[in-house]
Image (tube, rainbow, N blue to C red):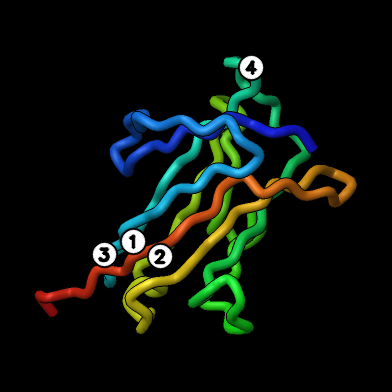
Amino acid sequence: MASFCVTLFDTIENPGENDACFITATRNLTINKGSGYRIKFLLSKDSNSVNLTGYSLRGQIRPSSSSPTVLLNMTSANLLLGIDNSNSTIFMNLPESFTRRVSEAFAVYDIELLNNIGESSKIVTGLITFVPEVTQ
């Protein structure tokens, strides 16, 4: 599958400063434990929007890339990942119930785009830092 440019959007949906036009973008995230978290990534190809019709997403969060433990399976089907084809964005939506129960201070994640014949392309990967709750 082709590579895309990936633009990070913050939770207020403002474009990030660092675009990545690589096969896989690396985006490290900081997430407050006990809070829901949603982030969007804009996909483009040669500065043009990308038609994502027929694509789906999958991803995982693990304590480390070599760990057999999966902290969270994310897919388009379970709505933790999604595609907005109207503006070529994908999103990750982590519920409060997940961030509240995570005991790790750090984890890793990745998101893959799958076409209609099952070929996958890793879109984004990175480290997640979980910030503990103080007020409980």
Task: For marks 1 and 3, give the CA distance.
Answer: 8 Å
Q: Nearer the viewer, residue 9 or 124?
A: 124
Q: Are marks 4 and 3 in contact (CB under 8 Å)?
A: no
Tag 3: amino acid? Asn
Tag 1: amino acid? Gly
Residue 115's quadrant in the figure?
top right
Identify residue for label 2.
95
Tag nearer the camera, 4 or 1: 4
Residue 1's quadrant in the figure?
top right
Identify residue for label 4.
46
**Nearer-N-terminus badge (4/1):** 1
Q: Residues within 10 Å of mark 1 (few under 14, many from 20)?
A: some
Q: Assign a secondary structure to mark 4.
A: loop
Check residue 36 in the rendering and tell me which mark sits there, or answer none. Answer: 1
Tell me if residue 120 comes above or below residue 13 in the rendering. Answer: below
**Nearer-N-terminus badge (4/3):** 3
Check residue 32 in the rendering and tell me which mark sits there, or answer none. Answer: 3
Task: For marks 4 and 2, give the CA distance.
Answer: 34 Å
Q: Position of residue 133 (x, y in %)?
A: 18, 74
Q: Assign a secondary structure to mark 3.
A: strand
Q: Are marks 4 and 1 in contact (CB under 8 Å)?
A: no
Name the residue: 38% across, 72% down. 106
- Disc tally is 4
Q: Position of residue 85 (x, y in %)?
A: 62, 31
Residue 51's quadrant in the figure?
top right
Q: Nearer the viewer, residue 13 or 67?
A: 67
Tag nearer the camera, 4 or 3: 4
Q: Assign a secondary structure to mark 2.
A: loop
Q: Position of residue 123 (x, y in %)?
A: 62, 45
Name the residue: 66% across, 25% down. 50
Tag nearer the camera, 2 or 3: 3
**Nearer-N-terminus badge (4/2):** 4
